[in-house]
Amino acid sequence: MHVPLLDLKAQYQAIKDEIHAALDKLLESQQFILGPNVEELEAKIAAYSGCRFGVGVSSGTDALLISLMALDIGPGDQVVTTPYSFFATAGAIARLGATPVFVDIDPVTYNIDPEKLAQVLAHLRRQGDWRVKAILPVHLFGQCADMQPIMTLAQDYGLKVIEDAAQAIGAEYPWRQSDGSIIVKRAGSMGDTGCFSFFPSKNLGGLGDGGMVVTNDPELYEKLKILRVHGSQPKYYHKIIGGNFRLDAIQAAALLVKLTYLNGWTAGRQANARRYNELLSEPGIGTPKAVYPHGDDPIPHYHIYNQYVIRVERRDEIRAGLTEAGIGTEIYYPVPLHRQECFAYLGDQDKDFPEADRAAATTLALPIYPELPAEALEYVAQAVIEAVTER
Ligand SMILES: *Cc1c(COP(=O)(O)O)cnc(C)c1O
C-alpha cells in the first residue's frame, strides 16, 4: 500500500467546483491586489482566532518578520525563542539584525519550556546589559505553547510576545482567569501578534504562499497595514520603511472557500490522532500528548495535529522501514536551530539544549491528513509497530 505523508489531491477533489467558482469570480474582477477577498478573509481569520484584527501577508515567514518590524525590533535587540522549530522562526529575528536567544523545549510538547525561559531571563537580567525585547514562542505541531506563564514573564520583564502559530490555526489554550475560572483562548490571540501560515501543507493551506498576522491592538494593526505596503501612508509618502508583504487576492479567494471546511478537517485529524494513539500504545513508541485537559475527552480538541509526531529510538532505521513499506514520513526537524551553520556566529553550538537535540534525533511525523482512509491508517500503525519491535 502507498500512503503519502499528505495528500492534497484528495482534499482538492472534494472542493474543486467551489474553488473554481471562487477563482472564476476573482478572474472576472481582475482585482488581484488586496481588495474585498483579502478584507473578508482578514475579518474571518481574526474572528476564528478570537482577535479583533487580521492583516493578510505574503507568507507565514513574512507574518513573523512584519510583526517584529512593527514592534521595532532591530539591531542589538535580543528575542527569546525555541531552538526546535522551522527555520523561519529564528530566521526572521536574525534578518532584522536582532539576536535569537534559544531556550530549550519541554520534552512532552516540544514547545519552549516556561521554567527554562524564566531561568534564562533571570540570568540575562543579572548579567546587566539587558537587551531582550520580545519572546517568540512557537505552537509546534498544532498544540499551544504554555502561554500563561510565558505571558506572566513577558509582563514581569516588559517584553512583547509574538506567537508563531503557523502550525496551529484554531488550536486552543485553557487560560485561567484571576477568579480561577478557565476560558479558552485560541492560538494567536494571547500575545501582541499571532502569525499564521497558509503554506499548502498547513491545516489551512492556500494555492501557494500566504500568511496572516492577527492582533487585538488597534495601533499595531494600523502599523502592520502600513508596513505591508512599503511603509506608505498616504500613498507615496513614507515615514517608515516597510516592504511588499501583501497577501494575493487569489489566495484569499481560495482560502475563503477552504476556511468553511477547516473545522471538519481539524476534527478528521483529531479522530485520526485518537485512532493512532489507541493502535500505537506499545512499548517503545512515544505517542504525542495533548497536554491541556478538556473535560473527559481523552483527546482534547486543543491540539489540531498539523503533524502527528511519534518518538522512537532507532528513528532513522524505522523511517527507512516505513519508506520501504510505501509510507511517507518526515523528520521535523533533523537539525535544531542552534546547530544550523548560518547561526554558528551565535556561539550556541556547544550550549546545552538537550531536549531539542533529543527531539531532533528521535521524532518522526506520520500521515495524519483528514482524508487518510482508515485502512491506510491501520496499515501505517501496523508497519510502525513491526519496525519498532523487529531488531
Ligand atoms: C510553516 C512555518 C513557518 C513559515 O511559514 P511560511 O508560510 O512557509 O513562510 C514559520 N514557522 C513555523 C513553525 C512553520 O511551521
Image (tube, helix red, strand yellow):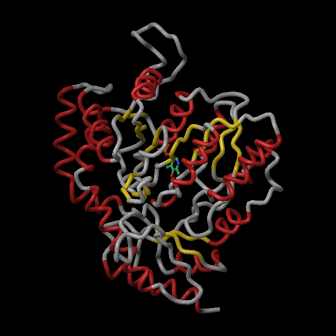
Classify residue 124 as left or right of residue 355: right
Q: Position of residue 39 (x, y in %)?
A: 28, 31
Residue at 50 percent across and 45 percent down: it is: 163
Classify residue 64 as left or right of residue 78: left
- The quarter holding residue 211 reads top left
Residue found at the very far bottom of the displayed protein: 390
Of the 4 image quadrants, the one containing the N terminus is: bottom left
Query: Would you place residue 177 above or below residue 216 in this image?
Result: below
Query: Would you place residue 103 above or below residue 220 in this image?
Result: below
Q: Nearer the viewer, residue 67 or 190?
A: 190
Residue at 30 percent across and 68 percent down: it is: 268
Q: Position of residue 383 (x, y in %)?
A: 48, 85
Query: Would you place residue 224 above or below residue 108 in this image?
Result: above
Residue at 27 percent across and 58 percent down: it is: 263
Residue found at the very far front of the displayed protein: 179
Classify residue 148 as left or right of residue 210: right
Q: Nearer the viewer, residue 177 or 109?
A: 177
Q: Position of residue 81 (x, y in %)?
A: 63, 48
